[in-house]
Image (cartoon, rainbow, N blue to C red):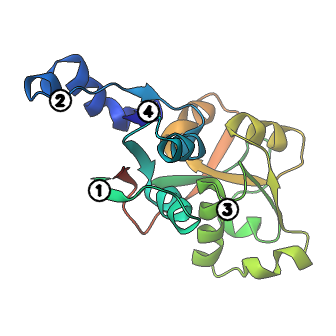
Amino acid sequence: VGGVSAFFNAPWQFAISSGLFKKEGIHVEWQDCQGGTGSMVDHLNNGSLDIAILSTDGALAEITQGGLYRIIAPFVDSPLKYGVYVSAESDIRSCHELEGTIFAISRKGSLSHVMTYLHATQSNWNPKNWDKTRASLLEVGNLAGARAALRNGKADGFLWEVGAAKTLVDKGEIRLIGYCSTPWPSFVIAA
């Protein structure tokens, strides 16, 4: 079983370490997948993982692209809560001020990308016009890349899961100016 190293996977790790699966005659090994959804999908497709805990949107996106696995059960029914962030030094104080600006995303097809479009749609912006205006998406690879893009002025804002970005807000590096939640359950079990 594979998943990212995150709090929501603690039940799996607890059940393994306390022998709950073993008591039922099931041998389970946990594998941390630092590459996120893409890494887990590769492992599922090549058979090095039997089961993965995936974000719902990531699982569905890869299935529609020919993924060799299926969703077998929901894992976390509640939505993911993403924050809308700007640099702590930014003059931007509200989400509506981000319309027409540059957003950092980890990569095309990532949840940060999907959530940026969801936020734009929920804000009644037209992301289809982004290529015709200054507004655009800047691929930065990961959270460290988003931080650097804000610091050096290459991006004006980004969306990221609130728990993962909390320490950066607490340290005063970035500022939370709004929220955007998925309208779907956050995680599924795929095999």
The residue under label 4 is 6
Element class at badge 4: loop
Task: Check residue 119 in the rendering and tell me which mark sits there, or answer none.
Answer: none
Residues marked 3 and 4 touching at CB (< 8 Å): no
Which kind of residue does numbered mark 1 sit on? Pro
Mark 2, mark 3: which one is toward the viewer? 2
Q: Earlier in the sequence, mark 4 or mark 1?
A: 4
- Residue at mark 2 to residue at mark 3: CA–CA distance: 51 Å
Element class at badge 2: loop
The residue under label 1 is 74
In the rendered view, would you say 27 is above or below 73? above
Which kind of residue does numbered mark 3 sit on? Ser
Front residue of 89/136: it is 136
**Where is the N terminus found, in terms of image quarters?**
top left
Mark 3, mark 4: which one is toward the viewer? 4
- Residue at mark 1 to residue at mark 2: CA–CA distance: 20 Å
Which kind of residue does numbered mark 2 sit on? Ile
Q: Residue at x 15, y 22 (%)?
A: 22
